[in-house]
Image (cartoon, helix red, strand yellow):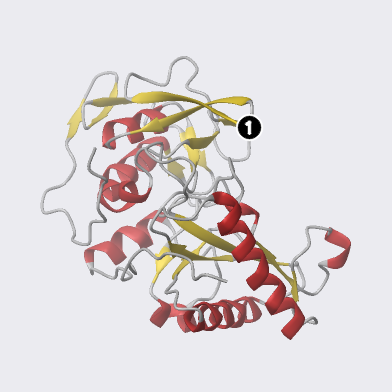
Amino acid sequence: MERPQAVHSVPKTPPLKVPSSKGLVLEAITITHPERVISETGYVTKGQLAEYHAAVAPYMLPRLLRHPLSLLRCPSGIGNQCFYQRNPGKGLGADVKPFKFKHKGKSYEYLYIEDAKGLLEVIQMGAIEIHPWGASIDDIDHPDRMIFDLDPAPDVPFDAVKLAAQDLRKRLKRKGLESMLKCTGGKGLHVTVPLSEKDDWDSVKTFAAGLAHEMVEAVPDAYVATMTKSKRNGKIFIDIFRNDYTATAIADYAVRARPGAPVALPISWNHLDELESASQFTMKDVLARLKRKKLPALPPPHRLPRA
């Protein structure tokens, strides 16, 4: 099957939206209770969430399609009981597919989607956050991205996180790797290197760990590469564990289950200096940026350099 390619232009026609006595219909998927408020902050409704996903689907789906997913479902809205789901289960719709596989003697079953209908079906069932694997089901043993999650301690100013992202980008460039930048919709930033699916999971994690430790050795007062929380005070945790087999990371353009429903937004490196926080973008902000074609350039996929 031909792999989906990134889309860089704004759709010329709006997504299909049809009124219904039972709810809102988008891409032939009925969104029930579109008036339900999912975030009191910003007064965000389920219908607005669905319309947003229908509009950003051309940008969101290329790096999401046919990847195993974990969903954070909040049927009663943000701030109420939420739970993660990775198995297809019941009630998720015909366009949400099962994917079963084995790895090192363990059996797994995840869900995945192939189109905008599948995306809207998971939104209909109360999904807020969408977290894909770093590999597609077509080659599950070779990731198509390497992720560095820059996670600051509570007392670290955001300007320090921006400097860390610039530092990491320069170090990757010296190794011949171009990277992408993303606001996570939370506290930190993701720096991601697209991969050509030639390196296995262990190789990718080993490379990422080596670079993280290189940064810690260079600036030990600013960085830490261990998960031990007691060692992270006043520092930025360079989290490379998104590169573990079965690990996931928040999708590009995905909404976060936080007050106001901020968006995890890819941005151009040229706009890093303008950032005030990693959670400043709302769904309305994102749609406005897409209309202005304010889209980051996507670097080509890389093969990791040999040791």
Answer above or below: position of 145 versus 135. below
Q: Relative to residue 110, is residue 83 drawn left or right?
A: right
Which residue is the extreme one toward the top?
90
Answer above or below: position of 48 versus 266. above
Graded by Cα atoms within 10 Å as few (under 14), some (14 to 19) or many (20 or more), the crowding at tag 1 reads few
The spot of residue 148 in percent (x, y) is 58, 64
Of 56 and 146, which appears nearest the observer?
A: 146
Residue hosting label 1 = 104
- Quadrant in which residue 22 is drawn: top left
Of 99 and 265, which appears nearest the observer?
A: 99
Answer above or below: position of 239 versus 79. below
Which residue is the extreme one toward the left?
12
Answer above or below: position of 223 versus 135. below
Please, what secondary structure does the residue beneath circle 1 have?
loop
Of 247 and 209, which appears nearest the observer?
A: 209
Residue 246 appears in the picture as rendered: yes
Which residue is the extreme one toward the front?
307
Q: Relative to residue 168, is residue 31 drawn left or right?
A: left
Write the residue at 55% across / 29% down: 76
The spot of residue 137 in percent (x, y) is 41, 36
Tell me the quadrant of the picture where the N terminus can be found: top left
Write the residue at 40% across / 66% down: 302
Tell me the quadrant of the picture where the C terminus can be found: bottom right
The spot of residue 187 in percent (x, y) is 62, 63
Write the residue at 50% across / 44% down: 133
Write the residue at 63% across / 26% down: 106
Amino acid of disc 1: Lys
The spot of residue 265 in percent (x, y) is 43, 61
- Quadrant in which residue 252 is drawn: bottom left
